[in-house]
Image (tube, coloured by chain):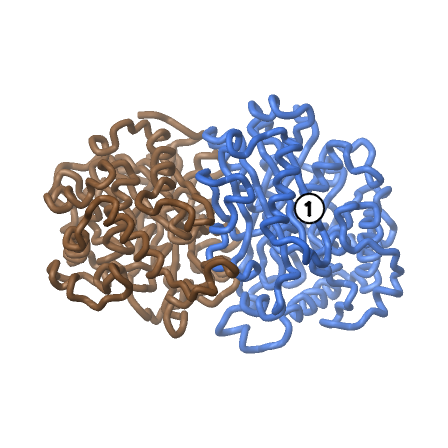
Chain colours: A brown, B blue
C-alpha cells in the first residue's frame, strides 16, 4: 500500500447523533453528543486529543456569525488548536480531509473531526437561507432557489443521456429502504417508484420524494497517527486518499450534465491511494445524494461507471446493498437525512463502520476493504472525496 | 525547520473606502501581485488555494463559491478556512508538510466598507441565548476586558494611548496603511469616550484591502526565489467561547498559540531570539496584553516598556512597525496576514522607510476580535540553520 504524508492517518472512532427536524438540542449540544460517542468508541477522552477540525455549512442556518467559534466547547476544542473549514455542501467529507492533514503534517498525533448543522433554527424555512448563496447582482434578482437550479441540472442530465424519471426514482426507493436499518434515520420508508412519481411537483422534474429533508444533527470521527492508532485499536481504518476541487463561480457557463469538479477531486484522491481502476478496486461507496439524480451523477463523477451508465446499474440492482457495487448502504441523505455538513461526515462514518464490519443490519456482504465517500457543494461547483482502506 | 517558506506576497489597499472596485477586483489585484512576486502561474504551478472568510462579513452564504475565478483557481484545489488569515496560513503550512503539496496560496481580504450594519453583524456572533439579548454595541466586551487588564497589571490609559500614537505614526511610513497620523497622547485621551475605558482613537477603524501569500516547500522555494522567508513555527488556539468563563485580564489563547509556535520553532527565550513583533492591536490595550501573553515582556510590563519607547521602531523590541491595525486599518480576517506581510517585507529588507536593521527573526500574531478568544502566532526567519 502506498505511503504518503509524513505520517499515515487512521480513523479509530466514529459518532453520530439522530438526524431530525427540530431537535431540541443546541448546535453545541449536538456536537457534544457526536464527539462523546466517537471518543467513547475509541476508548479515549478529550485529554488524548491534540486538535480539532470542525466543519459546518452556512452560518445563516444557525443564525450565529462565526458559528465555528460558538461551537468550540461542544466540539471539544477548548484550549486546543481548533479551526473550521467550510466548502458549502462539500464540507462534511472535506472536514475529514482537513483532519487528515492535521496529522499527516506531523504536527499532531490525534485529531477530532466534528461536523454540525442545525438547520431548523432558520425561520420560516432553511430554504430561505439558500437564497443568499447566489450572486447578488447576476442571480439573486431572479428570485432563484436551490430547487430551481438543481431542476436545471437534473433536466440536463436526463436529456443528455435519455434517462427516465422512473430510473432516477429507483435511487430514492433504494436509499429510503436502506435507511430502515439506520438507527439515526429521519426519513426511512418503504416506498415505490409510483410514490415518487406521484409526489408533489416542486419544480419540474424535481418532485418532493426526489429530495432529501432538512435536518439537525452532528457527526464526529477520531483520527490518529499510525503509532498512536495501533495502541488504540487492532482494527484501524486508514485514510489513503483525499481530494477536493472547485469549478468556476459562473455555473451558467458550463454544461451541467457532468460534474468535472467531482472527477478532478476523485482523481486527486485516487492518485494518493494508488487506485487505477475505481469500479474494481472500490468495494463500497457513499456518494452525495441530496437529490436522487445526484447519486447517479456522482457515481459517474467518481468514475465508478461510465457517463450515463449509472441509471442502468441502478436498474440492474448493482447498487443495492447486496449488489456488486453497493451505493449508499447507509440510506444516504435521502433516507438518513441531510444536516448538510453532518450528512457528509455521516457518509465517512458509514464507510468506517462498513470496513470494520460494524455496520450491523446495514453491513454489505463480501468483506469490503476499500470504500469511498464524497460530498458536493456550492453552486453545483464543489467536490470533496475521501478514500478509506482497512 | 526548513520545510515551508513564503515565496510571494501581494497586497492591495488598505483604504477606508474602495467604491471603484468590487471585492473580486481587490482579490485579483493582490493575487496578481503575489503571483508576479513569486513568479508563478496559478493555473499551472499552485497545488492548493485557501481563502479566509466568514459569510456574514461577505454578505453571501457559502463564500468560497465566489473565489476561484479571480484567484486563477478554477477546477483547482481551493477551500475556505473561516478564520483569520494566520490560521489559514497554518493550514497551508500543514498541507505542505504532508509532502503532497509543493505550493499553496493563502488569501484574506476585507471589503468592510460594503457592510452597512457592522454592529449588528458583530452582535450576531454573540451566544444567541445568553449574551445577544443583553443588547448594546458588542464592543462593550472590549471595554470590560480593558478594565480588567488595567486593574490586574497596573497599566494606565495613558500607556494604552501611547500605543495608538506609536502605531498611527508608524503607519505614515507604510504605503499600505490607511490611517497614518501624527497624534499626541492627549489627542487619544480626549477623543470621544466610547466603551469605557476605551476612547474613539483606541479602536482600529475599518479598512478595505486584500493580501495574498504564496507558500512553498523547501524544494519548490529554492527554485522560485533567492529570498525565501521560512515559517519556523505556527500555533493557534481557542479559549472558551463563553464570556462568563474567561480570564478577562489575560489573552490565554495567545499564550497557548505562542507556546505551540515557540516549541515548533525551538525558541526558548522569545525576548532574545525574536527581534521584532507584529501583534494584534484591534484595541490599543490588546497590543500590550498580547505582548505579555507572547512572553515578549514580563506580565504587567508592556505598558511601561511602551512608555519608555522600547516598542518604537528604534527600540529594543519594535512592535507593529507596519502601523498595526490601528494604523493600517482593521480588515476582518485579513488582520493576521497584514502582520505576516510586514514580517516578510522586513526580513527581506524591502520595508523601505520603515526598514529595521539586522533582523533575522520576527513574530506575527492575530486575534479574531470580539467576541472570540481565538488567536494564532507564526514565527518567521530569513535564515534557518
Q: Which of A1 and A242 is in front in this view?
A: A242
- At label 1, counting other C-alpha atoms closer than 10 Å, the crowd grade (few under 14, some 14-19, many 20 or more) is many
Evaluate whether residue B24 shows in this view: yes
Residue B85 position, x and y percent, is 59, 47
Corner quadrant of residue A234: top left
Residue A186 falls left or right of residue A248: left
Q: Looking at the image, is B135 positioned above or below residue A327?
A: below
Q: Name the element at disc 1.
A: strand
The residue that label 1 is drawn on is: B12
Q: Looking at the image, is A68 positioned above or below residue A314?
A: below
Corner quadrant of residue A35: bottom left
Residue A359 position, x and y percent, is 19, 48
Q: Residue at x 64, y 45 (%)?
A: B211
Quadrant of the drawing holding the C terminus of chain B? top right
Q: Residue at x 64, y 73 (%)?
A: B137
Corner quadrant of residue B40: top right
Q: Residue at x 15, y 43 (%)?
A: A312
Residue A207 position, x and y percent, is 23, 63
Residue B317 position, x and y percent, is 79, 43
Evaluate whether residue A181 shows in this view: no
Quadrant of the drawing holding the N terminus of chain B? top right
Q: Which residue is drawn at 66% across and 47% down?
A: B365
Q: Mark 1 lies on which chain?
A: B
Residue B191 falls left or right of residue B25: right
Amino acid at each position: 500500500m502506498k505511503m504518503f504524508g509524513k505520517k499515515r492517518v487512521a480513523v479509530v472512532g466514529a459518532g453520530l447523533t439522530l438526524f431530525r427536524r427540530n431537535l431540541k438540542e443546541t448546535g453545541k449540544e449536538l456536537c457534544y453528543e457526536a464527539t462523546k460517542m466517537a471518543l467513547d468508541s475509541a476508548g479515549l477522552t478529550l485529554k488524548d486529543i491534540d486538535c480539532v477540525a470542525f466543519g459546518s455549512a452556512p452560518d445563516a442556518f444557525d443564525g450565529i456569525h462565526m458559528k465555528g467559534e460558538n461551537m468550540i466547547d461542544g466540539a471539544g476544542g477548548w484550549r486546543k488548536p481548533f479551526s473550521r473549514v467550510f466548502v458549502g455542501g462539500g464540507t462534511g467529507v472535506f472536514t475529514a480531509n482537513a483532519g487528515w492533514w492535521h496529522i499527516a503534517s506531523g504536527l499532531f498525533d490525534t485529531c477530532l473531526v466534528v461536523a454540525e448543522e442545525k438547520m431548523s433554527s432558520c425561520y420560516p424555512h432553511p430554504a430561505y437561507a439558500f437564497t443568499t448563496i447566489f450572486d447578488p447582482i447576476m442571480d439573486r434578482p431572479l428570485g432563484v432557489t436551490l430547487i430551481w437550479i438543481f431542476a436545471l441540472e437534473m433536466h440536463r442530465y436526463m436529456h443528455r443521456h435519455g434517462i427516465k424519471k422512473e430510473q432516477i426514482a429507483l435511487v430514492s426507493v433504494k436509499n429510503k429502504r436502506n435507511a430502515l436499518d439506520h438507527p439515526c434515520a429521519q426519513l426511512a420508508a418503504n416506498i415505490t417508484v409510483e410514490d415518487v412519481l406521484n409526489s408533489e411537483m416542486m419544480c419540474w422534474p424535481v418532485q418532493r420524494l426526489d429530495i432529501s429533508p432538512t435536518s439537525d444533527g452532528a457527526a464526529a470521527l477520531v483520527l490518529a497517527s499510525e503509532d498512536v492508532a495501533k495502541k488504540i485499536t487492532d482494527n484501524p481504518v486508514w485514510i489513503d486518499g483525499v481530494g477536493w476541487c472547485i469549478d468556476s463561480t459562473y455555473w451558467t457557463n458550463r454544461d451541467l450534465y457532468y460534474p468535472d469538479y467531482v472527477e478532478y477531486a476523485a482523481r486527486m484522491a485516487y492518485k494518493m491511494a494508488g487506485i487505477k481502476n475505481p469500479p474494481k478496486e472500490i468495494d463500497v461507496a457513499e456518494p452525495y445524494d441530496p437529490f436522487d439524480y445526484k447519486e447517479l451523477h456522482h457515481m459517474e463523477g467518481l468514475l465508478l461507471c461510465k457517463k450515463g451508465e449509472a441509471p442502468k446499474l441502478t436498474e440492474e440492482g448493482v447498487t443495492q446493498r447486496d449488489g456488486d457495487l453497493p451505493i449508499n448502504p447507509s440510506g444516504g441523505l435521502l433516507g438518513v437525512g441531510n444536516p448538510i455538513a453532518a450528512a457528509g461526515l455521516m457518509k465517512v462514518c458509514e464507510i468506517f463502520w462498513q470496513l470494520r464490519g460494524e455496520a450491523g443490519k446495514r453491513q454489505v456482504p463480501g468483506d469490503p476493504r476499500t470504500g469511498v465517500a464524497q460530498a458536493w457543494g456550492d453552486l453545483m461547483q464543489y467536490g470533496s472525496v475521501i478514500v478509506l482502506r482497512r | 525547520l526548513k520545510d515551508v517558506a513564503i515565496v510571494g506576497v501581494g497586497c492591495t489597499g488598505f483604504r477606508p473606502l474602495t467604491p471603484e472596485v468590487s471585492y473580486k477586483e481587490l482579490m485579483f489585484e493582490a493575487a496578481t501581485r503575489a503571483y508576479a512576486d513569486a513568479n508563478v502561474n496559478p493555473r499551472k504551478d499552485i497545488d492548493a488555494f485557501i481563502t479566509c472568510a466568514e459569510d456574514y462579513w461577505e454578505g453571501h452564504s457559502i463564500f468560497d463559491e465566489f473565489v476561484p475565478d479571480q484567484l486563477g483557481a478554477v477546477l483547482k484545489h481551493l477551500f475556505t478556512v473561516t478564520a483569520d488569515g494566520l490560521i489559514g496560513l497554518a493550514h497551508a503550512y500543514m498541507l505542505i508538510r504532508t509532502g503532497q503539496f509543493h505550493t499553496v496560496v493563502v488569501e484574506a481580504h476585507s471589503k468592510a466598507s460594503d457592510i452597512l450594519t457592522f454592529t449588528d453583524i458583530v452582535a450576531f456572533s454573540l451566544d444567541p441565548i445568553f449574551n445577544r439579548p443583553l443588547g448594546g454595541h458588542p464592543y462593550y466586551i472590549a471595554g470590560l476586558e480593558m478594565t480588567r487588564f488595567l486593574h490586574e497589571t497596573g497599566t494606565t490609559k495613558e500607556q494604552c494611548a501611547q500605543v495608538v500614537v506609536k502605531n498611527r505614526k508608524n503607519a505614515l511610513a507604510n504605503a499600505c496603511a490607511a490611517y497614518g497620523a501624527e497624534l499626541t497622547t492627549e489627542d487619544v485621551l480626549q477623543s470621544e469616550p466610547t466603551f469605557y475605558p476605551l476612547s474613539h482613537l483606541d479602536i482600529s477603524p475599518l479598512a478595505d484591502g486584500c493580501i495574498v501569500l504564496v507558500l512553498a516547500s523547501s524544494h519548490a522555494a529554492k527554485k522560485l526565489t533567492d529570498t525565501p522567508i521560512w515559517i519556523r513555527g505556527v500555533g493557534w488556539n481557542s479559549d472558551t467561547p463563553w464570556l462568563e468563563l474567561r480570564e478577562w485580564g489575560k489573552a490565554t489563547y495567545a499564550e497557548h498559540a505562542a507556546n505551540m509556535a515557540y516549541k515548533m520553532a525551538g525558541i526558548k527565550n522569545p525576548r532574545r531570539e525574536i527581534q521584532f513583533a507584529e501583534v494584534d492591536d484591534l484595541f490599543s490595550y490588546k497590543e500590550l496584553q498580547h505582548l505579555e501573553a507572547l512572553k515578549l515582556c514580563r506580565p504587567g510590563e508592556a505598558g511601561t516598556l511602551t512608555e519608555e519607547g522600547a516598542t518604537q521602531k528604534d527600540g529594543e523590541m519594535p512592535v507593529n512597525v507596519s502601523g498595526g491595525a490601528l494604523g493600517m486599518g482593521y480588515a476582518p480576517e485579513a488582520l493576521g496576514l497584514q502582520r505576516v506581510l510586514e514580517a516578510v517585507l522586513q526580513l527581506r529588507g524591502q520595508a523601505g522607510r520603515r526598514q529595521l536593521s539586522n533582523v533575522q527573526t520576527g513574530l506575527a500574531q492575530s486575534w479574531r476580535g470580539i467576541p472570540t478568544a481565538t488567536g494564532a502566532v507564526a514565527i518567521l526567519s530569513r535564515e534557518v540553520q
